[in-house]
Amino acid sequence: MLWEPGNPPGVEERVRKALAEVDPILVLYGVDPHTKVLRGDFQQENMIATLTTFFGVLGLLLAAVGLRASDVSALSEARHAGPS
């Protein structure tokens, strides 16, 4: 990893030449901006956080619907039973 402030032009070519001087067999496959590298590093963590949030909200929604259905069912049974 090489960090160059401000992303000046010609950095990739200078690095390729420097590597060729050290060892001609070394190959530089690609150059990516630092922001892209960081985004890729945190992509899995972001996906896990998003899925956890989604399933948490879904669980709360299902619990709320279940409680509401339970209340409606209990009220319906109380009405059908009539006064005791």
Image: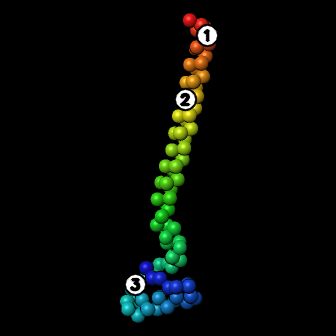
- In this orientation, which residue lies closer to the viewer: 75 or 12? 75
Q: Nearer the viewer, mark 2 or mark 3?
A: 2
Percent x, y of residue 82: 60, 8
Q: Nearer the viewer, residue 77 or 27?
A: 77
Q: Residue furthest top?
A: 84
Question: Looking at the rendering, in which quadrant would you find the N terminus?
Answer: bottom left
- Real-space Cα separation, disc 2 to disc 1, in angstroms: 20 Å
Separation of residues labelled 2 and 3 (CA atoms) = 65 Å
Give the answer, above or below, for where 3 lies relative to 39: below
Q: Which mark is residue 26?
A: 3
Residue highlighted by disc 2: 67
Nearer the observer, disc 1 or disc 3?
1
Q: Going from the N terminus, do you reach mark 2 or mark 1 first? A: 2
Q: Amino acid at mark 3?
A: Leu
* Disc 1 secondary structure class: helix
Q: Secondary structure at mark 2?
A: helix
Residue 56 as seen in the image, left or right of residue 79 = left
Residue density around tag 2, few if under 14, some if 14–19, many if 20 or more, within 10 Å: few
Residue drawn at the location 62% of the way across and 13% of the way down? 79
Q: Earlier in the sequence, mark 1 or mark 3?
A: 3
Instruction: Say which residue label 1 marks.
Output: 80
Residue 54, position as x, y percentages in the image? 54, 47
> Foreground residue, 43 or 54?
54
Q: Quadrant of residue 24?
A: bottom left
How crowded pointer 3 is (Cα within 10 Å; few <14, some 14-19, many 20+) is rated as few
